Image (spheres, rainbow, N blue to C red):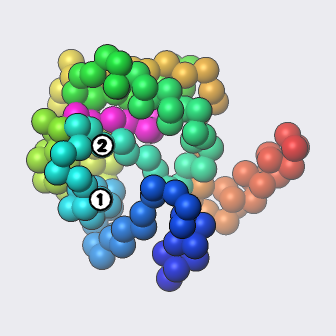
Amino acid sequence: MAADEIRPRLRNTRAKVIINPVFTEGCSGSYKAGMATIDPCAEAVMVLLGDQPGVDSVVIGQVAEDWRTRGGRIALTSYRGRRGHPMVFARELFDQLRQLSGDKAAWKILDAHPDWVRDVAVDHAFPEDVDTRQDYETLLRAGAAHG
């Protein structure tokens, strides 16, 4: 199981591995698994995708700080005008996150309530998904070209 490989890398961090027993349900299964473990005092939750390794700590920090400073219901990263993850959802939306179903789950909330969304502009390239072996090899080649 991949979790057994990941846990040792997270030992000295605040991150924790959560097993999603219903991963076949799409993103909503991940939301449900994560939301089941959230601190009841949490003011917000940040959602990132595991298949976007191009999301770096600078972007994560910028979006988190924007939400801490400006608040709101949803803070959404905008990579040079293209919307993506991470997303921050305020506590008042936790129940809606728990009730999502299917894939592209959080986008359903954003589509239904565009007035709740505040874009957080970041000057970074959009982090592409790595879904296949070919995507992974392309990512490695790109890293080699820049490294």
In the image, residue 22 above or below residue 107: below
For disc 2, the neighbor class at 10 Å (few under 14, some 14 to 19, many from 20) is many
Three-letter amino acid code of the residue under disc 1: Gly
Of helix, strand and loop, which one carries label 2? strand
Q: Position of residue 140 (x, y in %)?
A: 78, 55
Q: Which residue is mark 1?
A: 34
Q: Number of labelled discs?
A: 2
Is residue 28 visible in the rendered image? The answer is no
In the image, residue 84 above or below residue 65: below
Residue at the image position 45 percent from the left and 35 percent from the top: 84
Residue at the image position 21 percent from the left and 62 percent from the top: 36
Residue 69 in which image quadrant: top left
Write the start and end of the magenta stretch as one range. Answer: 83-90
The residues bearing labels 2 and 1 have C-alpha atoms spaced at a distance of 10 Å
Residue at the image position 43 percent from the left and 26 percent from the top: 65
Magenta-span inclusion, residue 105: no
Q: Residue furthest front?
A: 12
Q: Are the residues flagged by discs 2 and 1 in contact, CB closer than 8 Å?
A: yes
In the image, residue 123 above or below residue 146: above
Q: Position of residue 57 (x, y in %)?
A: 58, 39
In the image, residue 88 above or below residue 6: above
**Would you say 39 lies left or right of 19 here?**
left
Of helix, strand and loop, which one carries label 1? helix
